[in-house]
Amino acid sequence: MARAALAAILLLAASPAAAGPGSTAANFLKIGVGARPVSLGEAYTAVAEDVNAVYYNPAGLAFLERQEVTLMHNKFFKGVSQQWGGYAFPSAKFGTFAGAFTMLSVEAFDSYTAQDQPNGKVGASDFAGAAAWAFEFPGIDGLALGGSFKFINSRLAGYSADSAAIDAGLLYRQDEATGWRLGASVRNVGTEVRFISEAFPLPLTGTVGLSYRGSAAPLWTDASWMFTAEAVGTNDRNPYAAFGTEFRPVDEFGIRIGWRQNQDTGLGLAAGIGFRSLEKGFTSDRWPEIGLDYAFVEYGRLEHTHRVSLTLRFGTPKAERREGVDRRAPKFHHLIRY
């Protein structure tokens, strides 16, 4: 998977020019998911520390400690809405398993015949379902690999087209809570989407990202900050960059700002906030943690969009379950890495 991700990124970087907007199909796959990643300019390849990693970099799933489920609603442009959901289960021995879906729906709109005569209304919708797996690489602390398989379906005016694709990624983190992270991913490597007699490729995307998380102490006790940046190459436009930063005055509240270069319309600015339930001294370690995140994205003449995500983290932490496995099998505990 790591070789596949790096090879795809190098291939995209070596391409003299992209084919241009409108040359790919199933472009709903390029619409960012998760309010937190979107508010960071979608520069999430080297962050990928929650269930949203299924979309941005499946390798990040390997570092999850508790089960996670998330749901997001995107009030996109007029008449268009997006839904995203995911679930991840970090096992004690065999890595993290996850599933996710994304749906894009368009309100019914006017249709016309080849002679430009009104022909009633038609609808359009897109769907993608993904199954993912990630694990910590044996022998190298902090290195994780992951991949996913996706089924894709697009519908328009009574016609339907299917496709399949894989994503792959790697993520290295210097430390669990702070320090540097380096990530790379390749997304939407798959079959063409064919409507009737016309076929178009999927929006192949390769990313390389870098992030850093540090403490703001002693200037601000308990505060932390994070910066993330990534380079993106696609098969339908020239390479571009994305950046994001997050400040947490306390661990349960975050303020975020992001920017994406070369956005089709607008300045590419995004912002958001996030809350999660109190932990220290207030609840048991096994009590579900609730997260609520909001993202605002500016699109110039198309105005702006709003995304809201609800996330639950629950169950016994993976580290505790792994200790139980180690106690039951002491002869092999030093070999268990995932």
Image (cartoon, helix red, strand yellow):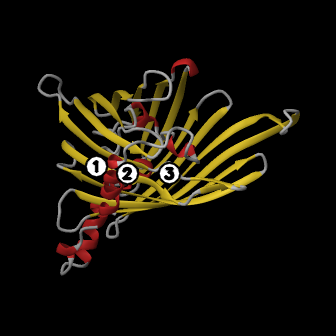
Please state which of residues 200 and 156 is positioned toward the viewer in this rendering: 200
Label 2 sits on residue: 57
Vertical placement of residue 325 versus 147, above or below: below
Front tag of 2 and 3? 2
Name the spot of residue 155 as percent of width and height, x first. Answer: 70, 49
Vertical placement of residue 328 versus 3, above or below: below
Provide the secondary structure element on which disc 3 rests. strand
| Inter-mark Cα distance, 2 to 3 | 14 Å
Please state which of residues 16 and 61 is positioned toward the viewer in this rendering: 16
Reading the chain from its start, which is encountered first: label 2 or label 1? 2
Dividing the picture into quadrants, the one containing residue 118 is: top right
Front tag of 1 and 3? 1
Residue at the image point whose x is 49% and y is 37% from the top: 309
Name the spot of residue 32 as percent of width and height, x first. Answer: 48, 39
Question: Which amino acid type is marked by label 1?
Answer: Gly
Reading the chain from its start, which is encountered first: label 2 or label 3? 2
Label 1 sits on residue: 183
User: For the N terminus, which image quadrant?
Assistant: bottom left
| Proximity of marks 2 and 1: CB atoms separated by less than 8 Å | yes
Reading the chain from its start, which is encountered first: label 1 or label 3? 3
Residue at the image point whose x is 19% and y is 42% from the top: 178
User: For the C terminus, which image quadrant?
Assistant: bottom left
Question: Which amino acid type is marked by label 2?
Answer: Asn
Label 3 sits on residue: 86
Residue at the image point whose x is 17% and y is 49% from the top: 174
Q: Residue furthest front?
A: 16
Question: Which amino acid type is marked by label 3?
Answer: Gly
